[in-house]
Amino acid sequence: MSKFVAYYRVSTDKQGRSGLGLDAQRQAVADFVANRGQIVQEFTEIESTRNKRPELQAALDACRKHKATLLIARLDRLARNVAFISNLMESHVDFVAVDMPEATRFTIHILAAVAEHEREMISKRTKDALKAAKARGVKLGNPTPLPALEIASNVLKEQTRLFRDTVRPLIEQLRAQGYTLTAIAEELNSRKIPTARGGLWYAMTVRNMLISEEEDR
């Protein structure tokens, strides 16, 4: 039987206290381990910065001690940073993400690179929007928050529009093939395509996307 060291992570102390996300991670890990082996140790990280992870280091040490595999529920719970994943790989500790157990090291590098690029592009679009607003004479950081809120709202709308333009062709193709709303949601989830907010697709989510599609025309 294989040995696993489970590593759970939430990004804020508030989430840690509430248990938000941890129960789902534990359940996913437990389901994966069933009939595959046993969990020899568990570590839970509650932190707000991706570079300070003492529990992850402890988990890696435990993997070496027990000759076990590091097991996480979701790849994004580990990191969305290319350099961090590279360092993890250089530690010579095998790891598996429950949501993508078939992923190779090369695949994980690509996914991390895409996630990092997406984060950088969102940051750039936000900065460009703020810079453009400042050039128009909008005072940022003043006691009246309405202009800044309007800018943030416009940035969010633009990000949502770009997301829709990216996902719509696939949804339209599936719909043309006779997929139901539920079937489309399941297909998108199986392809590891998150919603605009990074969540899972449901029939209602797909329906809302189709409604917004008609409204934009």
Image (spheres, helix red, strand yellow):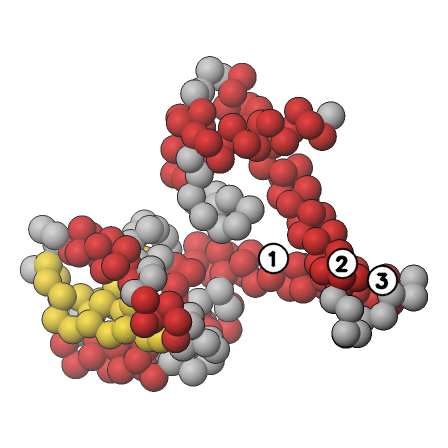
Rendering coords of residue 56 (x, y %): 32, 77
Residue 206 as seen in the image, left or right of residue 153: left
Task: Tell me which amino acid carries mark 3.
Answer: Ala
Per the image, label 3 sits on a secondary structure element best described as: helix
Q: Quadrant of the C terminus?
A: top right
Name the mark on residue 133.
3
Residue 36 as seen in the image, left or right of residue 173: left
User: In front: 207, or 122?
Assistant: 207
Q: Which of pointers 2 and 1 indicates the residue nearer the eye? A: 2
Rendering coords of residue 108 (x, y %): 43, 58
Q: Which of pointers 3 and 1 indicates the residue nearer the eye? A: 3
Q: Please give the residue where the numbered disc 2 appears in the rendered image.
A: 151
What's the CA distance linking mark 2 and mark 1? 20 Å
Q: Earlier in the sequence, mark 2 or mark 1?
A: 1
Per the image, label 2 sits on a secondary structure element best described as: helix
The quadrant holding residue 21 is: bottom left
Q: Is residue 125 visible?
A: no
207 vs 118: above or below = above
The quadrant holding residue 115 is: bottom right
Q: Residue at x 66, y 37 (%)?
A: 165
What's the CA distance linking mark 2 and mark 3? 7 Å
User: In front: 87, or 133?
Assistant: 133
Q: Please give the residue where the numbered disc 1 appears in the rendered image.
A: 118
Rendering coords of residue 100 (x, y %): 34, 51
